[in-house]
Amino acid sequence: MSSNFLDSLPTELGDLPSLQDLDVSDNRLTFLPDTLGFLPKLESLNLSHNYLRFLPAELDQLQTLTALSLDSNHLLSLPCSICKLNNLSSYSLDWLKYSPFNRASLDEDGFSEFWP
């Protein structure tokens, strides 16, 4: 589904319980449906090169997720739920077009490992 000029994903995405890999990179996504968190077997999620400003808090339900790519987005914040992804072993946050984060807040929330 990458590089298809998508500006949204259907909420029915959560009705695909066997989905393991989702690549929606290089689209025009500005938000994600909360149902993204209802994918119990999702292992790899590529959201890079979109226009995302926020991520759904329901991401913490993706307990089988091992790879997450958020490169080149417009994120204003990262949900604390990312810290609950215990199996996450590969992540990419390069070239985020984020508003300046409060460094102390990043440290408190456990995000300091994402930024040097």
Image: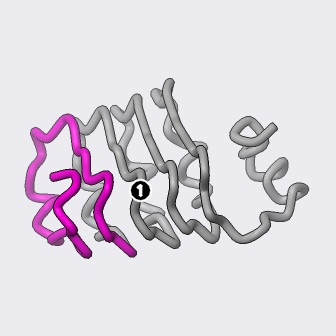
Q: Where residue 94 sits in the image (x, y, percent)?
A: 60, 44
Question: For the magenta stretch, what is the residue range?
Answer: 1-30
Magenta stretch: includes residue 51: no
Magenta stretch: includes residue 24: yes
Residue displayed at 14% across by 60% down: 13
From the viewer's perspective, is residue 34 above or below residue 65?
A: below
**Which is nearer the eye, 11 or 9?**
9
Task: Report crowding for label 1: few under 14, some 14 to 19, many 20 or more residues within 10 A (C-alpha).
Answer: many
Residue where numbered disc 1 is placed: 49
Residue displayed at 21% across by 51% down: 2
From the viewer's perspective, is residue 58 above or below residue 60?
A: below
Give the total number of marks visible in the rendering.
Answer: 1
What kind of colouring is applied to the model shown? one colour
Q: Secondary structure at mark 1?
A: loop
Q: Where residue 12 sits in the image (x, y, percent)?
A: 10, 67
Q: Which quarter of the figure is the C terminus placed in?
A: top right
Q: Where residue 9 sits in the image (x, y, percent)?
A: 20, 68
Residue displayed at 60% across by 56% down: 96
**Which is nearer the eye, 99 or 42?**
99
Residue displayed at 33% across by 70% down: 29
Secondary structure character of the magenta stretch overall: loop
Task: Please state if 103 lies on the left or on the right of 20 as rendered.
Answer: right
Q: Tell me the quarter of the picture where residue 77 sits.
A: bottom right
Q: Where residue 98 sits in the image (x, y, percent)?
A: 66, 65
**In the image, what residue type sits under mark 1?**
His
From the viewer's perspective, is residue 107 above or below residue 88?
A: below
**Which is nearer the eye, 113 or 62?**
113
From the viewer's perspective, is residue 98 above or below residue 48?
A: below
Task: Please state if 45 lies on the left or on the right of 4 as rendered.
Answer: right
